[in-house]
Amino acid sequence: MKYLRSLAIMLAICMIVSVFPIMSFAAAHADNGSAYAADETQATPDPDATDDPETTAEPETTEDPDVTADPDATAEPDATAVPEGTADPNATADPNATVSPEGTADPNATADPNATANPNATASPSATPEAVRYAINVAEVPNSNITASATSAPEKTRVTITGKASRGYIYVDAYYLDSADKKSALITNSANSFSKDVIMPASDITVYADVDPMSPSQLYSDATRQYNDVTQNLSTYETRYTNSSSSNYDAADIRELRNLISEARKILPDLKDAYTYLNNQIREDNVTNAALDDVIYEQEELDEITDQIDVIVKKMGGNFDDGYFNVYVNVERGGRVTVSGAASGTIDAFSSSAYDEFDNILYRDGDSLTFKIQCQSGYTIGNFRINNRTVQISGNSFTISDTNLQRYISEGGGTIDVRVSFVYGSNANYGGTYNNSGNPYYNGGMTYGGSDSNNNNNNTGIPSSPIGSAIFSDLGNVEWAVPSITALYNMGIVNGVGDGLFDPQSPVTREQFAKMIVGVMGYQVDQSATSGFSDDAGDWYSPYIAAASANGIINGRDNGTFGVGDNITREDIAVIIHRTQGSPAVEIHEFPDSANISAYAVEAVSFLFAKQIASGDDQGNFNPTNSATRAEASKMLYGLYTITH
């Protein structure tokens, strides 16, 4: 019995001793579980280790981090780590794993203020389309100076491109190409200078031009135009500045301007003598290089002085860069002009010519200017000019819109110069008197009448807008032309032949058409000018032929004649209209009688068809060599007016 009791005690002790190392081993490895990842077989303790209380209970063995973290012992990837492809459950808790750019995105990255507020990331000009600037390049052209108001600009920005050819030369073409080689014209007819507003495309552009020497007649017209413009400007400057009692102008500036005006007046007679001598040689068909050179020399001498005058006038007239501008209105006897909008006032010239200044007007976005014209009884408007350019006016008023006001101010160097003249008596019949052949001749460059409203209620002298058939009694067979005839009549471009008749089937002569198209296009007309064509007798038509020739739309015949008295053909009208638009390329349209169209007119006739200015007769024929009737000419001219205005 004693033996059995002793045996039981020994068995109990053995069981306690056996369990203790197992519990100690498990507890020790539980404390270091993050570095232990063995399977069940690998976790079975060595029998020698579990039976040895010294080994299993050794604190240095179970708690020494160097032992439990030994990669060769419990964390060796090849031995105890999770097999490849199996995600380590402890890896997701590793902070270094979640911020790795190649692993899981760091949630703090989106909240990083430096990331979302980085100006280079969210406000970079190169990332914002409207901030991209495109270059404006200018190809070098001999005898020409072309400049742009900026060397680069964003898309949809307005840029002004100006060109000035040397005296004696003329631009026959000026255009720009975008990066796709798309051509955009800068001029619609030949000229010594041009200024064109361009809306920038989303592309770099390059400006090109073709410059040719002027013909003798072109040089003559250019010189006479310069003489008249400078003479008129000098008179205005004397009235406005040198003879003004205003204290707004610096005394030194006034003295300098007086001296420059005096110098210019000395050159003007020499210029006139030179171009008069040239004109005589043109008439005799014996033009010499010496005569041409003399005109060019005097023109350049005058340019040198007037360029200096322009600088000081701009200084005295105010600089638009300061945000202020002036409006000067000069009204000849025969009516009054009422100004409203950015400036307001009335200039009354019923009894004598009148002049008024509106100085230091603050420019504000949205401003506009309206000039309302009232004619005295017996008078009509003769001419309306802004900054020395004739302006088309429909009705009895003209408004410079808010989108165009800044352009007019800049063009005038801080000043908008307005001049209004009137015509009295027989010439006031909305288009003039009649010549011996019964055909009317018209006041070119000016339009009258206009809208459907009656502008004649207050004795303005400006006609209302009746329907064509009510104006003339003989339009029954040309109903297709009635709207055009009505519009041109109300603009003062055409008139009847008397007794309420328009005579729509009568032919139009070449000189009559020259005056009509000059009126439609609003070209400047010098009443003292002659064209230089050998058959130009200096009659009523001379200034209009000269204006058409100077603008490059009518060249005359190969033998040096204009063809005065000859009827104008339909194809020649097409060529002239085509030239007013710069002779653009167009897809050729085949008419049934295309074989009858002269080679020089093929593209022009197709242009009229493409623009719906002319489409042919009932059979589709264009009848190119037929003389154009008054009705046909009116239809084509009004078609031109609609595409240019």
Image: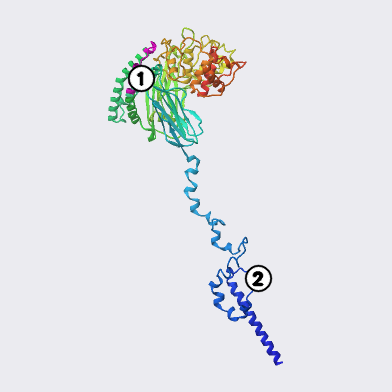
Q: In this view, does 27 lie above or below 579?
A: below
Question: x%, y% of residue 16?
Answer: 64, 82
Residue shown at 65% from the left, 85% from the top: 13
Residue 342 appears in which quarter of the rendering?
top left
Q: Judge by depth and name the residue closer to the eye, 233 or 610.
A: 610
Identify the image quadrant of residue 250. top left
For the residues labelled 1 and 2, the Cα–Cα distance comes to 113 Å
Q: Which of 406/124 is in front?
A: 124
Q: Mark 1 points at which residue?
A: 227
Magenta-drawn stretch contains 343? no
Residue at position x 48%, y 11% from top?
Answer: 440
Percent across and percent down for residue 9 are 67, 87
Residue 10 visible from this viewpoint: yes
The residue lying furthest to the right in this view is 1
Q: Tell me if residue 295 is in the magenta stretch.
A: yes
Callout 2: few (<14), some (14-19), or many (20+) C-alpha neighbours within 10 Å? few
User: Which is more N-terminal, label 2 or label 1?
Assistant: 2
Three-letter residue code for mark 1: Tyr
Question: Dot 1: few (<14), some (14–19), or many (≥20) neighbours within 10 Å?
Answer: some
Residue drawn where x is 70% and y is 91% of the image: 3
Label 2: which residue?
40
Task: Report whether residue 622 is seen.
Answer: no
**Which residues make up the magenta segment?**
281-302
Q: What is the x, y in percent for residue 423? A: 42, 16
Tell us which disc is closer to us: 1 or 2.
2
Classify the position of the N terminus by image quarter: bottom right
- Judging from the image, the colouring scheme is rainbow
Residue 124 coordinates in the image, percent (x, y): 48, 45
Task: Decide whether the magenta segment is chiefly helix, strand or loop.
Answer: helix
Question: For residue 551, what is the image quadrant?
Answer: top left
> Secondary structure under badge 1?
helix
- Mark 2 lies on a secondary structure that is helix
